Image (tube, rainbow, N blue to C red):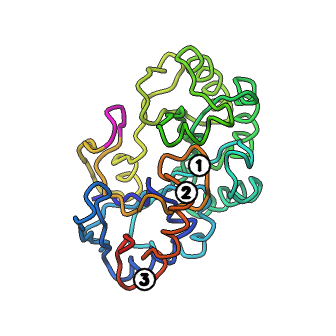
Amino acid sequence: MIISCSRRTDIPAFYSEWFFKRLQAGFVEVRNPRNPRQIRTVSLLPEDVDGFVFWSRNPAPMLDKLDLLADHPFYFQYTLTPYGRELEPNLPPRSERLDTFRRLSDYIGPHRVIWRYDPILFSQDIGLSYHENSFTVLARQLAGFTGQCVISFIDLYRHIEKKLTPLAVRALDEDEMRLLGKTLSHIAASFGMTLETCAEQIDLSACGIEHGRCIDDALMSAISGKPLRLPKDKHQRKACGCVASVDIGVYNTCAHGCQYCYANASSQQIRANRLSHHFQSPLLVGRVDDT
């Protein structure tokens, strides 16, 4: 069993203390987001967990606690994007997040820190040249600290589109995806990185970009030294290549406030959840719900 921490929120940035308390306790109780009455107890014991995949935009709060994961294989999906405060209002300065990326890579190895450049979006001020220039700058700064980059193109779900309309944000068409994909693939290769897509229908193999799987049993096997073969995750989108995992996060609890985030419905709901959430207290209960 692989534990996903988490597609639904940024556990490393905001709930690392909670996570390590749950790791010490050896379990966590997770509420089904589609059926709130259904609660599952998930073991976090080394003999039951094949590894952890951490998703984060700012894992700095975890860096001094990584020794507590000595009994577990793990790797990070680390998102670094080039947008400004109008889209990412609450993130630390990019220079700090770049420094955190490099420190994390130095500590656990570049093969265990995957750079996510997503979501890719267009607006009046953001187009092909913007992404070409921004990706080049970031790739140069991350060269040698990772060998893999994952990209995805924005999906304008209804609750996201409502927030982004005033910013004139739009999705890319397939021609734009191919043109940008070819450009980014060339840049990535020049800095020693491979490029993969995350849950994208479009085939960009002609651009040197393969379909990826962010939760990857082959990578986890390489990290742990133990053979691991898991089925495809049937609960994800059809184009998602991830293997099965258990996510222990909760929607509407991430305080980064990124305007394009699918995991947050409203800022008011986030504030309410963070005030009453069991991520905060009482930690010993072990749940990740707000009952």
The number of numbered discs placed on residues in the rendered structure image is 3
* CA distance separating discs 3 and 1: 27 Å
* CA distance separating discs 3 and 2: 21 Å
* CA distance separating discs 2 and 1: 6 Å
Q: Is residue 253 above or below residue 189?
A: below
Question: Residue 194, how many percent across, how many down?
Answer: 55, 34
- Badge 2 or badge 1: first in the primary sequence: 2
Q: Residue at x 75, y 29 (%)?
A: 130
- Badge 3 or badge 2: first in the primary sequence: 2
Residue 245 is left or right of residue 255, and the answer is left
Residue 168 sits in which quadrant? top right
Q: Are dots 3 and 1 in contact, CB under 8 Å? A: no
Q: Are dots 2 and 1 in contact, CB under 8 Å? A: yes
What residue range appears in magenta? 236-241
Q: Which residue is mark 1?
A: 79
Q: Which residue is mark 3?
A: 283
Q: Which residue is mark 2?
A: 56
